[in-house]
Image (cartoon, rainbow, N blue to C red):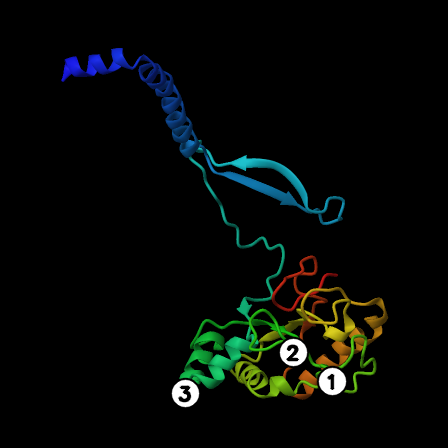
Amino acid sequence: MGGRGWLLLTRFPLAAGLLLLLLPVLYDTRAQRKAASNEAPRIYVVESSEDQHETLQEKPALTFGATRTPNLTITVNDAVRYQQIDGFGASLTDSSAWLLWNKLTEAQRKEALQMLFSPTKGIGLSILRQPMGASDFALTEYSYDDLPPGQPFGASDPDLKRFSIEHDRAYILPLLREALALNPNLKVFASPWSSPGWMKTSGSMIQGALLPSAYPAFAKYFVQFVQQYEAAGVPIFAITMQNEPKYIPNDYPGMIM
């Protein structure tokens, strides 16, 4: 075998030369892969300041390292208090509310809500962030002031004559009332994922921005929502102008602001 191998190399000097050239390349590639796998994970930092002096500014990357601080002591002083936490919670989106209302028996639903909202027999969720209309977790795209199908682009309802929370009366509002009965201290705040489509540049709840001409109607939209929810037994603790105001999703309700 040794003689044949030598014969092969002497008879094919070009192949032998290429082999010798490739060996350091292969070694170098393996070394690079090993070095890359041993590199510490990099953390990319984007920062905004409270006074808006900096907004979404990229900062130098951080890396995890093996360095440890010896004899580190953390002292928790519960006598010193800073910010106040209003609570911890979740959201009864259209899809989750539909499942709770339609796919569980009454006994199962009551047990689930008790485990979620009861301060004594459950985890006592005390905050709910409710979508105003459809979100990315909804059975359909809907707002509280949708125009009939077939309306031309530019059709509108500036006086909100068609405003209605009827969609939410089917299963969202009943569940919210049950949650409030279990935890009277529950705070509900609301956020729209999108205004009605006719208020937007896209003419749809998907993509687009709020038309300046629709500002007064959108303000009325908030007022109507708060008033009608309170009349339905669900007081609104607070509202936000928009979910993800700087992001425009492509396939679910959203609006740049």
User: What residue does disc 1 label?
Assistant: 163
User: What residue does disc 2 label?
Assistant: 142
What amino acid is at disc 1? Phe
Residue 174 percent coordinates (x, y): 56, 86
What amino acid is at disc 2? Tyr
226, above or below 73, in the image: below
Residue 209 percent coordinates (x, y): 75, 64
C-alpha span from label 3 to label 2: 27 Å
Which residue lies at the image location 41% right of the left edge and 87% below the top edge? 105
Determine contact: label 3, label 2, CB under 8 Å: no
Looking at the rendered structure, which numbered label has been put on residue 30?
none
- Identify which residue, 180 or 62, lies in the foreground: 62
C-alpha span from label 3 to label 1: 32 Å
Looking at the rendered structure, which numbered label has been put on residue 105?
3
- Identify which residue, 134 or 4, lies in the foreground: 4
Residue 148 percent coordinates (x, y): 72, 85
Disc 1 on helix, strand or loop? loop
